Image (cartoon, rainbow, N blue to C red):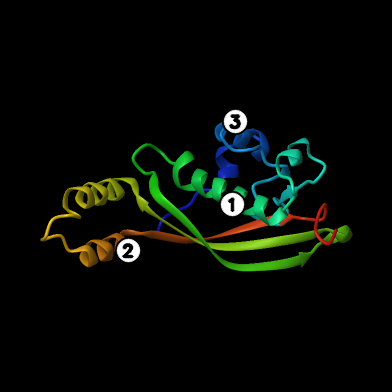
Amino acid sequence: MVKIERVSDFYRDWEPQDLLARKYKSMSPLPIRGGWGYSKEDAVVIDTTHPAAAHWQPFQGVRIEHAFAQLRMYEELIGIRPEGSQHAGCEKRPLEQMLVRGDEGKLYDVLRFEIKALPLDVWERLKAEWEAGVDSPGFDRAEHECRREAAMVRYVGEYWFEISSFFGK
């Protein structure tokens, strides 16, 4: 089991929207405010009135949720990890989606993903092995895939989004 640090603990002085826009310049900035989405109190607020919303037309809140989840996952597995403990081959698979009603009529979308990745050193070893042997007659593809799957680290990521600005409109 891999220990996942909260991005919010690492980037205490950065708003997620500002940090992600600076780090992921090839991607359109996200129309978000608020926190990193670890709880209702720390929810990512998806804001249809944010200036960055113009980059996400037609406006699809779920698309923005998935983009944010991808970037937070990258930060958890690569960005905030010390040198030598990063991961590669990061993937997320939806597990659950819930609508939660909050105070003052606020609505929250809670997404849970199974997240998996390979420790970077394992990924590099398996990649080199694959490239050297995949076309050779003695290469055992099934055994290689079995070792890859066994080396995967997994966790469930939960993401809270406040969606009142667009849900049902």
Between discs 1 and 2, the one toward the N terminus: 1
Q: Residue at x 36, y 53 (%)?
A: 118
Q: Residue at x 22, y 46 (%)?
A: 128
The C terminus is located in which quarter? bottom right
In three-dimensional space, the C-alpha distance between marks 3 and 2, rounded to whole angstroms, equals 33 Å
Q: Name the residue located 26 percent from the left edge and 49 percent from the top edge.
A: 127
Residue 4 placement, left or right of 64:
left
What is the secondary structure assignment of the residue under circle 2? Answer: helix
Q: Mark 3: which amino acid?
A: Arg
Look at the image and tell me in which quarter the N terminus lies: bottom left
The CA distance from mark 1 to mark 2 is 23 Å
Instruction: Report the front residue among 63 and 7.
Output: 63
Q: Which mark is residue 107?
A: none
Q: Is residue 71 above or below residue 145?
A: above
- Residue 17 in the image: state x and y as whole percent: 67, 38
Q: Amino acid at mark 1?
A: Ala
In depth, the one of 162 and 62 nearer the eye is 62
Disc nearer the start of the sequence (3/1): 3
Residue 8 x/y as whole percent: 60, 43
Residue 22 is marked as: 3
Name the quadrant containing residue 94.
bottom right
Callout 2 amino acid? Glu
Cα distance between the residues tagged 3 and 1: 17 Å
Tell me: residue 97, above or below residue 43. below
Nearer to me, 90 or 54: 54
Q: Earlier in the sequence, mark 3 or mark 2?
A: 3
Q: Are marks 3 and 1 in contact (CB under 8 Å)?
A: no
Q: Is residue 43 visible?
A: yes
Query: Residue at the spot x=68%, y=45% of the render?
Result: 35
The mark found on residue 149 in the picture is 2
Residue 116 percent location from the top left of the image: 43, 58
Residue at the spot of label 1 = 69
